[in-house]
Amino acid sequence: MGNPIRPIVDYTGSIGYQTPEILAPLVGTSVNSKSLAEEMMGICIDDGDIFNLHDVVSLFTNTPIEKCLDIIKERLENDKTLKDRTKLNTEDIIELLQFILTTTYFSFRGQIFRQIFGAAMGSPVSAIVANPFMEWLEKGAKMTAPLDCKPKYWRRYVDDVLEIIQKDTTLKLTEHLNTIDPTGSIKFTHEEEDQGKIPFLDTLIVRKEDGSVKMLVYRKKTHTDQYLNLKAQHPLHQKLGVIRTLMDRKDNIVTEEVDKREEERKIKNALMECGYPKWAFERVKHQMEAKTKEPKKPKKSDETPSKGMVVIPYVEGLSEQLQRIFQKHKISTAMRPTNTLKSILVHPKDKKDILETSDAVYEIPCKGCDKSYVGETGRQFGVRLKEHQKDSETVKDTKFTRANRKASTSEQHKSAITDHVAQENHVINWEGPAY
């Protein structure tokens, strides 16, 4: 009791799921690992300066919604391309965002809760709303920073900021950053470099004795080198993609050749422990080399466009055959595993009562024979089940004479279940429905 929680809500398919596409052009570009590594190659740190990190405490759940909407509204009003992305006007978009951001509900242990401040974790809208706010905040922070703690270098990724500042000015800069948000909800923590090293994103920035900087791949102390196992029920191209991703990261982040060789050794040792043979590394190496040498081919005007994509469950051997068939018809395929450890072991949400399920296909068996009724309902299953029971019990409780029974068997009832009860005088298994 009394412990704060951060709700994580599944927004897939919700009314706000496509909203980020409208707002995306309003958000500036953030630094990424590759661009950071390129910048660091040209930086030399003075003896009186240090690397420092600032991190926002729980950005999404502390984002001041009203201030965010004011910032977004101003940007939308100045956006000349808005009409090319949507038919909604600025007032419509702000009203939609206001609704999405203030109506986050979730259930926990049978109780329904409503988030009363900030944006929800798991919503794509949260990131697209928080980013313009952070851009506004960092602009004000840099412009008003006192000269003796003004950062000489500033790069941000969402709520993480990398700076080069003078030694012994970290606390003063932190105090300054914590005064920018007018609501007082956004607070920063800080972390100074340790022995000339500091992690940022998935990189480890290392300051050398001459003041120049080199980059390494950063792994947390809790990192276990556990990757997709070669024996896992996944298509081969996904397993080779693990090798390609790690090798790409090595090439894009690590700046010195001796460190690249050491990183490649770590990658191979880790993946060989996961069952990857030498031929897998060789195949990926040849693919990557061929891609760099191969000139980009212009798209032919008479080339048949893709007819879309289909997602299929992965069954070894069968899914590959289906993929080849779809390719012949210009249909792209994506494969997903049928079972995962997460789906088997992890159940973070309260289990929903079967009777509360809506938009369901259900089956109701008969006790007197091997027949069963299959139906579909858009309402809650429990409501529809009670209707079936009531209709069937009404027919069953009727005292039939021969004439009445003959008339009842020819009568059209509300559902096939009731017809079955009237015609066969059977009992329905109301305890055995499934959906």
Image (cartoon, rainbow, N blue to C red):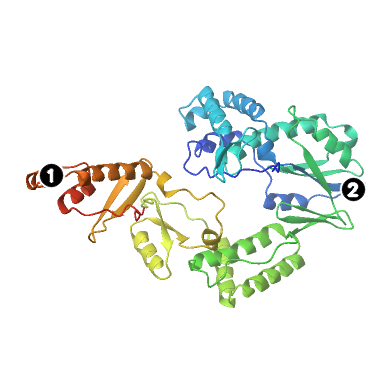
Q: Residues within 10 Å of mark 1 (few under 14, many from 20)?
A: some
Q: Residues within 10 Å of mark 2 (few under 14, many from 20)?
A: few
Query: Which residue is under mark 2?
Result: 46
- In the rendered image, residue 34, in percent from the top left (x then y), is placed at 68, 53
Q: Nearer the viewer, residue 121 or 428?
A: 428
- In the rendered image, residue 418, in percent from the top left (x then y), is placed at 21, 46
Q: Which mark is residue 408?
A: 1
Which amino acid does the dot numbered 2 rest on?
Asp
- In the rendered image, residue 223, in percent from the top left (x then y), is placed at 70, 63
Q: Nearer the viewer, residue 201 or 37?
A: 201
Determine the residue located farthest toward the bottom in the rendered image: 278
Residue at the image point whose x is 29% and y is 48% from the top:
375
- In the rendered image, residue 218, in percent from the top left (x then y), is placed at 73, 59
- Res. 362 in view: yes
Left or right, 344 with respect to 66, comes to left
Q: Which mark is residue 36?
A: none
Q: Nearer the viewer, residue 314 or 153?
A: 314
CA gap, disc 2 and disc 1: 96 Å
- Res. 150 in view: no
Left or right, 78 with respect to 404, comes to right
Say which label, 2 or 1, has the lower sequence index. Answer: 2
- Helix, strand or loop at label 1? It is helix
Q: Nearer the viewer, mark 2 or mark 1?
A: 1
